[in-house]
Image (spheres, rainbow, N blue to C red):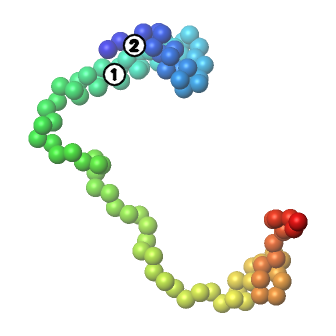
Amino acid sequence: MRLTREQVLHVATLCRIGLTEEEMERFQAQLSHILEQFEVLKEIDTTEVPPTSHSVALHSVMRPDEPHPPFPKEEVLRNAPRREGDFFRVPLVLEES
């Protein structure tokens, strides 16, 4: 399927990008090639292929969430740039009215 210049311009407008004449020709060829590859894929018989949500098995890269004892209060407060008693002192966020 060969895209027309107007179709490429329409896609560029939807993407809100400006294209030079050289880019227009290059993208017209590249996008046309991509659509031709989809036409090839349409010819493949997938009736026996079960639907999947992902092409490969997924696994979590996160470690399990396990409880640990908290850090000592003094150690944590030692890192505070400003401290007021047992609390962090922070700049006023909301004005009092």
| Crowd tier of the residue under label 1, counting other residues whose Cα lies within 10 Å: few below 14, some 14–19, many 20 or above | some
| Res 26 seen here | no
Nearest the camera: 53 or 21?
A: 53
Quadrant in which the C terminus is drawn? bottom right
What SS does tag 2 mark? loop
- The three-letter code of the residue at mark 2 reads Leu
The numbered mark, 1 or 2, whose residue comes first in the sequence reads 2
Identify the secondary structure beneath mark 1.
Answer: helix
Q: Quadrant of residue 93?
A: bottom right
Which residue is pictured at 77% across the width and 83% down the height? 87
Give the alpha-carbon distance from disc 1 to disc 2, as whole Å. 9 Å
- Residue designated by label 1: 35
Q: Indicate left or right for 18 with 4 as reference.
A: right
Q: Are marks 1 and 2 in contact (CB under 8 Å)?
A: yes
Circle 2 crowding by C-alpha within 10 Å: few under 14, some 14–19, many from 20: some
Amino acid residing under circle 1: Leu
Asked whether 2 or 96 is in front, the reply is 96
| Residue 6 percent coordinates (x, y) | 48, 10
Residue 93 as seen in the image, left or right of residue 7: right
Direction from residue 53 to residue 6 in the image, left or right: right
Across and down, in percent, residue 90 comes to 81, 72
Extreme front residue here?
Answer: 97
Quadrant in the picture for the N terminus: top left
Q: Is residue 30 above or below residue 52?
A: above
Checking the image for residue 85, the label placed there is: none
Percent x, y for residue 36?
30, 20
**Residue under the point 42% across and 9% down:** 4
Q: Name the mark on residue 3.
A: 2
